[in-house]
Image: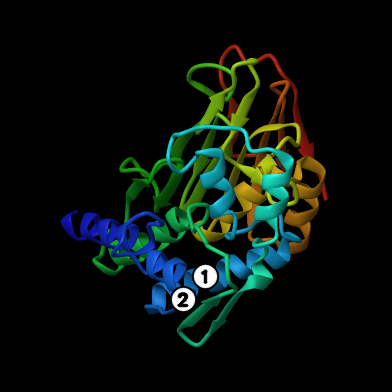
Amino acid sequence: SDSAISLINKLSSQWSVTDATSEIYALNSSGEAVLSDDTAMLIRHALDMSDATNGAFDITLYPILREWGFTTDQYQIPNDERLAELLQYTGSNKVTINGSTATLESGTKIDLGAIAKGYTGDLVSEQLISMGIENALLDLGGNIHAIGSNPDGDPWKLGVRDPHGDGSIAFLSLTDAAAVTSGGYERFFIAEDGTRYCHILDPATGKPANSGLASVTVVGSEGWLCDAVSTAVYVMGAQKGMELQQKLGGFELLLITDNGDIMITEGLQQALTTAEGFSGTVTVMVS
């Protein structure tokens, strides 16, 4: 619908880190800004996720992402001194939100890219449901929001991309759920020596995450939560990811390891079918 598209465009320009008219740009430029309700809520959610994941989810990595070239496509490998210098300005404790006013410590800049699409999906889904739409599938690039079931009354069948090849590695049958995937294949560059650097950084090091996972898919009722968790678990790895799922609840996980195996939480067992030709193992993590 046109109104959904205009809402998506509005939110994406509101939360863009590079658009000079956005609220985030204003906040990053001046270190303090009065925010709209949606933006204030999004930053609150982000700070909550940072606490819940012991900093594995971090919206303050923008200067480091820029240094690597992930925001400009001018890729380079920063040296350790430069990373140490930039890491001084990171950490969610450097972001304060009071009512609708957000304040950043000097040198700190935020980027909501790892949670904004999920929240956009939530707000657009709400809008569609309020218009009386009962069945819809929203695809916001790696963020899927399934409203109701498909037109035949069956669950929506979503493909989970094979991070090591073409097509899907597995399928999930979902009704009324958000599903968000994060993987190193989404944005990366290959250095002269053949090393591959992905855009999901480990906030502890400022370097690309390397946790043994090739992709993380999170299924739940709230897109913002799924979006943030998918990034955090990609950084944390399988074991800590499963612990996070038990601690927080509200979502299920499908992890694909670097060697092509699948690990899922119990709640996705019935929803999963593996693709034809899948030769790895499927492990169900029982809490």
Residue at (69%, 38%) from the top-left corner? 79
Query: Where is 194 relative to 91, above or below?
Result: above
What residue occupies the far front of the structure in this picture? 81
- Residue 220 in the image: x percent, y percent? 56, 55
- Residue 137 in the image: x percent, y percent? 35, 46
Q: Is residue 186 visible?
A: no
Q: Which quadrant of the figure contains the N terminus?
A: bottom left
Q: Which residue is mark 2?
A: 40
Residue at (77%, 41%) from the top-left corner? 238
In the drawing, does residue 239 fall left or right of residue 276? right
**Residue placed most toward the observer, 178 or 26:** 26
Residue at (31%, 61%) from the top-left corner? 20
In the drawing, does residue 124 fall left or right of residue 88? left
- Residue 177 in the image: x percent, y percent? 49, 53
Quick one: SS at disc 2? helix
What residue occupies the far bottom of the structure in this picture? 99
Q: Which residue is mark 1?
A: 43
Distance, label 1 to label 2, CA atoms, is 5 Å
Quick one: SS at disc 1? helix
Query: Where is 265 relative to 124, above or below?
Result: above
Residue at (35%, 48%) from the top-left corner? 138
